[in-house]
Image: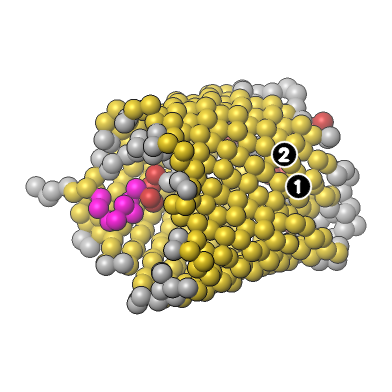
Amino acid sequence: MESRKSVGVSGLGLALLLGAQGAMAQVALQPQAIPFGSFVLVPTLVSQTIYDDNIYNLSNGEVASFSQVLNPTLAFVAQDRLNFYTAKYALKAASYANDSNDSYADQNFGLDAHIESGSRLRLDGGLSYSMLHDPRGSGSSAGVSSAGIRTMGEGDKYDLANLTAAAEYGARDARGLATAKVTLGQKRYSRDGVALSGDNDIVSSLLGLRARVMPKTLVLLDYERVDTNYKTNFDSVKGVGTPDALDNRFLVGVTWDGTAQTTGKIRLGQGKREVDGLGSKDRFTWDLGVVWKPRALDTVNLNGGASIVDATGDYLAAENTHYSVSWTHDWADRFNTVLTLGLSNDDYSVKPGTLAKARSDDGKTYGIGANYQMRRWLVLTADILASDRSSDVSAFDTKRNVMSIGAQISL
């Protein structure tokens, strides 16, 4: 009988499969893999039972529902020295008790490669295709009443394709490094009315220089450019379509690894968004990500940022500022808890030709979760997340509580 073996691809299997599934620190799946030619196959499954007391994010007349979510993932992983290759398929399907039109089955296909042809050049490439949806109460149906949402039928479905290429030049311990990245994206909605304003093509790029000032500390200089072209030309009189936008950001910062028990990155700079036919807007831009381990059993994650982001519906863009902190404590080798707090502010600008008015939202989120590793291949989870959004437009003034129990399963 063919044997099974543990994933030993330099920990790549765990990094791929568990990075977004909530297992923290010592509490994490330890999957076994099935040999499959030159690859190993790593299957995992996440199952959740969720109760949401405001599934449409309404200010009044809230609708509550239970849902059952299944998220199986298949990943083929191969390693050749420092080169890594992955092929991944993920399905996320949910069944809602309240209304079958809320149920969905999102799918994602992805191919990724990391190639190191020598000590100075590292190449990354990726191709992904996703079939996703906007949950009812978001996107084009955000701020709509529950009766209005029901008349729309199921949530808006769309296809998302991305092609990414990246390169880094310079030895890992060199004084200087250069990096470049380009991503081509395409988004297409299945519903014609939403496609008029939502279909777009995006070209995003990054050029960066890194200078080593200490063995594990780099100074960064980055230039980012995002060119968003919408399929339908914008008509400000009829309020149809969405104007094209061009974002340019210049940032300087520092990244460090293992300095004084912390690892992180901070960048500061200036961003400018030019909207076709509607002028431009400048904004101070920053982003922060820090992991701090004050003690062996505690991990604190700090994140934040400020930038101009796209909006949906009658809104053109939003000036977003957000902060979040999470604290993970390992009570035992197999049990930990996670506390989270998030704050955000969004100032929305309105598309010309619409009846909407500019709005400002302040949001707060609070969360507590627990993870218990019953077996090497089984992690049990429980989470509670409360959110409170205060808006000067009453339809967007909402409160929401989501509770879930689940399991992460592997071979």
Q: Which amino acid does label 2 sit on?
A: Ala
Residue 220 pos. (x, y %) = 58, 65
Separation of disc 1 and disc 2 at Cα? 8 Å
Q: In this view, does 106 lie above or below 238?
A: above
Q: Is residue 178 above or below residue 344?
A: below
**Residue pictured at 67% horizontal, 44% vertical:** 322
Residue annotated with mark 1: 313
Residue 104 pos. (x, y %) = 52, 39
The reply to whether discs 1 and 2 touch (Cβ–Cβ < 8 Å) is yes
**Is residue 113 or residue 117 the one in the foreground?**
117
Q: In the image, which residues are magenta?
A: 7-14
Q: How many labels does the image show?
A: 2
Which of the labelled discs sits on residue 227, or is there none? none
Q: Does the magenta stretch include residue 283?
A: no
Quadrant of image for the C terminus: top left
Residue 408 pos. (x, y %) = 36, 35
Q: Does the magenta stretch include residue 12?
A: yes
**Residue pictured at 67% horizontal, 32% vertical:** 364
**Residue pictured at 28% horizontal, 61% vertical:** 78
